Each structure stands twice: as structure tokens, then as C-alpha cells.
């Protein structure tokens, strides 16, 4: 039995949450569940990973699976075709794994919730259980896409292999970037390292030295937590951070005289960036030196 309605309601509710919170949603918001025919339905089950909307009328297939940042490193192996998601436990026939199998056999879309920092999740949907591998105690999750106009969007597979792999790569990069941000921002107490702005929605994680793609674990010591303005300025070499952690403004900005915003930016010239809360997370001096050389040659 398919249960497209509950899935559509779930995806629509996630779109609303993401419009409010951005691509990552706090667990506190997810914990409230979504409305379906007058009832609150949970989005996920954090304890067991694999979740099905409770009563049988809503179908035998999983509605979502989830991974915490810790689990994803050890369990969710990424392949060019998707993500290998581990069964719950070692028994392919337990009910969790049967829900996964049903999602595969019925070919229904599910949500893949990936932890990007403690108590924050990136919902990736529609996701399909593309392959079931009971012998390996795992399934292959592949990513689909939403098609159609705003009020009649529907989840579909991506039939073309090249496009499918492209989407997998894109999702992977977005998860990596989100987890990098999820590691870097808390290290700086959710403040801009330069101006101390404390509004998470205006903060980014910037790589000091360009991100080697698929480099695995996000390394905090290769990151800074600038606000959007400082991130853009850092990327454009209008602001630099020297190995002694001092902030430098480009000549061009310093010589310019153009209104209150620029005055504010100039105020941080010569100041020192915020130190991360742990020594281990301090920006790597070699990385800073390399990056600062680029800043100096740009001006
Ligand atoms: Zn800033």
C-alpha cells in the first residue's frame, strides 16, 4: 500500500520549516512533528534511525531515516550513486529493516535527516531506497528531486545517471559544508570572528585554505566564522587575517571614504580575531600564512 498523502504532507511541512530556519532545522522544531489530517505526526525517530509513521493505515514503509554527525562518518559510506545506510541492528528481518525494504519495494520517497551539528538536521528529500542489500546489512539511498509548480510539487526519481551522480555530488558537498559550518561556528561561540556579530543566520564558515573536495572530516583549524559581509570581504581579499591573528583591511578599503558601513569595517583594521574556545581549534598558522600571502599580493 502506498501512502503518498502523508509523504506529501511531510515534505510540505519541511519546506515551511526550511523557509523559516534555512536548510538546517533544529531538532526542537522537528520534534513538534507535522500536521496530517488533524493529527501531529513525528518526522523522525532519533533513537533508532529508521522511522515509520505510526499506524498501519499510513503504510508499511519507512518515512525517514537519520544520521547524527558522529554516525555519518562511520556508517553512511558515500558512493557516487548515493549513500550506504546501515540497517538497524544485525537482523535484516526486524521491523525497522522491513520498513526500509518496503520503502524500496513500494518505491516511495523518504527523508534522509543528516545531523550537521548537535541537535540540528539537514533534511534531504525526496530520497529513495534504491537498493536493498540484506547480506551487507545496508541499503543504498539515492536522491530524487521535487518537480512541478509551487503548490503541486511532487517527488520524482532522476532517471539520467549523469544527472543522478551530479545530484549526489552536490548533496555530499552541501552536507560537508553544513557539517564544517556546524563544527566551526560553535568553536567561535556562534560569533563572527572579526566583528563578533552574534546572529547565526548571518554567519558562515569560511575555509582558510581552499577546501580539498571530499576531505572527510571538517577541520575546525582550517576555518573561520565570519559574518556574511566579512566572509565576502575575506573571499575577495578585501580583509585578511595575519598569522598573528590580526585583521588587515585592503589598501583600497582603507583609502576609500564612503559612508558609515565602511567606517565600521575600517574599525576592525588592526584588531585581533576572536580566539576559538579551545586551543586545538585555533587557526592553523601555516594555513593563515599561505592565505595572508594571497591577501597581500592582491592589494
Ligand atoms: Zn563580521
Image (spheres, rainbow, N blue to C red):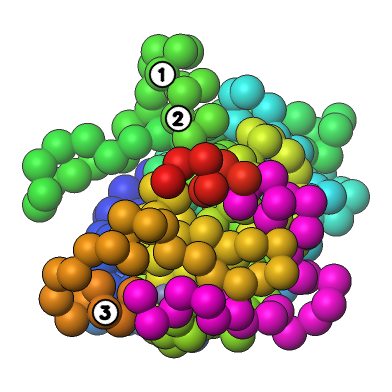
What number is the disc on residue 263? 3
Q: Nearer the viewer, residue 243 or 215?
A: 243
Q: Can you tell which mark lies on residue 163?
A: 1
Distance Cα–Cα, label 2 vs label 1: 6 Å
Is 289 inside the magenta-drawn segment? yes
Please tell me whether mark 3 sits on a helix, a strand or a loop. Answer: helix
Does 200 sit left or right of 130 as displayed?
Answer: left
Q: Which of marks 2 and 3 is nearer the N terminus?
A: 2
- Residue drawn at (18%, 81%) of the image: 260
Quarter assignment of residue 35? bottom left
Q: Which residue lies furthest to the front in this view?
A: 255
Q: Mark 2 points at which residue?
A: 167
Magenta residues span 266-292
Left or right: 183 in relation to 8: right
> How far apart are the alpha carbons under marks 3 and 1?
47 Å
Point out the quarter of the image occupied by ligand 1.
Answer: bottom left
Amino acid at each position: 500500500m502506498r501512502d503518498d498523502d502523508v509523504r506529501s504532507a511531510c515534505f510540505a511541512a519541511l519546506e515551511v520549516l526550511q523557509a523559516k530556519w534555512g536548510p538546517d532545522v533544529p531538532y526542537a522544531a522537528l520534534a513538534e512533528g507535522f500536521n496530517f489530517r488533524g493529527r501531529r505526526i513525528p518526522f523522525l525517530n532519533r533513537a533508532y534511525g529508521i522511522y515509520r509513521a505510526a499506524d498501519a493505515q499510513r503504510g508499511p514503509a519507512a518515512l525517514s531515516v537519520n544520521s547524527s554527525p558522529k554516525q555519518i562518518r562511520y556508517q553512511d559510506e558515500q558512493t557516487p550513486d548515493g549513500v550506504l545506510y546501515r540497517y538497524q541492528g544485525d537482523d535484516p528481518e526486524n521491523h525497522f529493516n522491513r520498513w526500509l525494504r518496503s520503502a524500496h519495494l513500494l518505491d516511495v520517497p523518504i527523508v534522509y535527516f543528516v545531523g550537521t551539528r548537535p541537535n540540528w538536521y539537514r533534511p534531504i528529500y525526496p530520497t529513495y531506497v534504491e537498493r536493498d542489500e540484506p547480506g551487507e546489512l545496508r541499503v543504498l539511498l539515492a536522491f530524487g528531486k521535487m518537480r512541478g509548480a509551487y503548490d503541486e510539487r511532487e517527488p520524482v526519481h532522476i532517471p539520467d545517471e549523469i544527472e543522478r551522480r551530479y545530484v549526489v555530488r552536490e548533496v555530499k558537498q552541501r552536507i560537508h559544508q553544513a557539517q564544517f559550518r556546524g563544527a566551526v561556528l560553535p568553536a567561535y561561540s556562534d560569533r563572527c570572528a572579526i566583528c563578533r556579530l552574534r546572529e547565526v543566520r548571518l554567519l558562515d564558515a569560511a575555509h582558510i585554505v581552499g577546501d580539498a573536495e571530499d576531505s572527510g572530516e571538517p577541520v575546525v583549524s582550517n576555518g573561520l566564522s565570519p559574518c556574511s559581509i566579512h566572509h565576502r570581504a575575506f573571499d575577495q581579499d578585501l580583509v585578511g587575517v595575519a598569522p598573528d591573528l590580526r585583521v588587515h583591511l585592503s589598501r583600497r578599503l582603507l583609502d576609500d571614504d564612503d559612508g558609515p558601513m565602511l567606517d565600521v569595517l575600517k574599525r576592525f583594521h588592526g584588531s585581533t580575531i576572536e580566539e576559538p574556545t579551545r586551543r586545538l581549534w585555533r587557526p592553523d598558522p601555516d594555513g593563515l600564512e599561505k592565505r595572508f600571502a594571497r591577501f597581500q599580493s592582491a592589494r
